[in-house]
Amino acid sequence: MATGLTGALVAVLTFPTPLLKIVGALVCAIIGATVLAAARDRDRPPAGLLALLSTASVATLALVIVLSNQGIPAPATPAHTAGGPSPSSGPATTTDAIGTARSVPPTPPNATSLTTLRPVKNEASENLWTTGTMRLKGVTHDQAIAATGAWCGSTEVEFALDGKYDRFSALIGIADESAETKPLDFYVLTDGHRVGDFPAVGKVPQLATVPVAGALRLTIGVEPPDGDASTCPGPERVGMWADPLLTPAR
């Protein structure tokens, strides 16, 4: 009887499914009971009973082999929600509000980056305007125009548009590389006329957009706000125009 109980316990602990556990335990219990009865009677169990027990044992073994080969079904993969991030794609890369770590202005179709145009007016001796990769509020922008030395006064750079564009846009702010974080005034001129003013822009980016339809020249500039107490020379303030784009005329 101890052998039957041991076999039943092994079946319950090792068989992978509830059905196998039950069948295995029953077979072991029947075998144990038969052996116990035979020991008491000191007689061999009937041949029919032994054949039945053998058949049950073989059937149980076959069932264990079949179900084990089938394996355990893999957990279902969550369905991808339309408009949401893919389960394996990591954090979402959608555009957030201006001033957040993932804010990126929408790119108009066929837009031209201002960084690809050669300035028609920029004092080379001052070397105040540069282009390249810079960071604005933790976001890296591969295309940017930055003015240094603006803490001493206004500085401008001018480009030829030749009437080819309708709108100019850029994210503006104090670059992360700036030693001084005080704000600057940003402004835009077309053909010498001031068409856009963005006062006291600091580390939080702002979206600057101005119409430039028919304009022959575009000038962007930065300068200290009125009443700025910074000394000149002093810690460098870098006014940055990130992703400066020109939308072509229709």
Image (spheres, grey):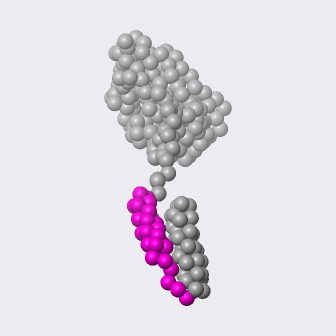
Query: Compared to 237, does 82 lie above or below?
Result: above
Q: Is residue 85 left or right of residue 110?
A: right
Range covered by the magenta-colored residues: 42-71
Q: At 47% across and 16% down in the image, what residue appears?
A: 211
Query: Compared to 52, does 234 lie above or below?
Result: above
Where residue 217 appears, as percent x and y from the top left, is 40, 18
Q: Nearer the viewer, residue 163 or 99?
A: 99
Image quadrant assignment for residue 42: bottom right
Image quadrant assignment for residue 3: bottom right
Q: Which quadrant holds the N terminus?
A: bottom right
Query: Compared to 199, does 15 lie above or below?
Result: below
Where residue 218 appears, as percent x and y from the top left, is 42, 21
Q: Is residue 61 magenta?
A: yes
Q: Is residue 198 magenta?
A: no
Q: At 47% across and 24% down in the image, what residue appears?
A: 169
Q: Nearer the viewer, residue 203 or 49?
A: 49
Using the rendered image of the protein, determine whether residue 6 is visible from the camera's viewpoint: no
Q: Nearer the viewer, residue 83 or 194?
A: 83
Where residue 160 appears, as percent x and y from the top left, is 36, 21
Using the rendered image of the protein, determine whether residue 100 is visible from the camera's viewpoint: yes
Q: Which quadrant holds the C terminus?
A: top left
Q: At 54% across and 28% down in the image, what residue appears?
A: 207
Q: At 46% across and 46% down in the image, what residue appears?
A: 88
| Main SS, magenta residues | helix
Where residue 61 appears, as percent x and y from the top left, is 43, 68
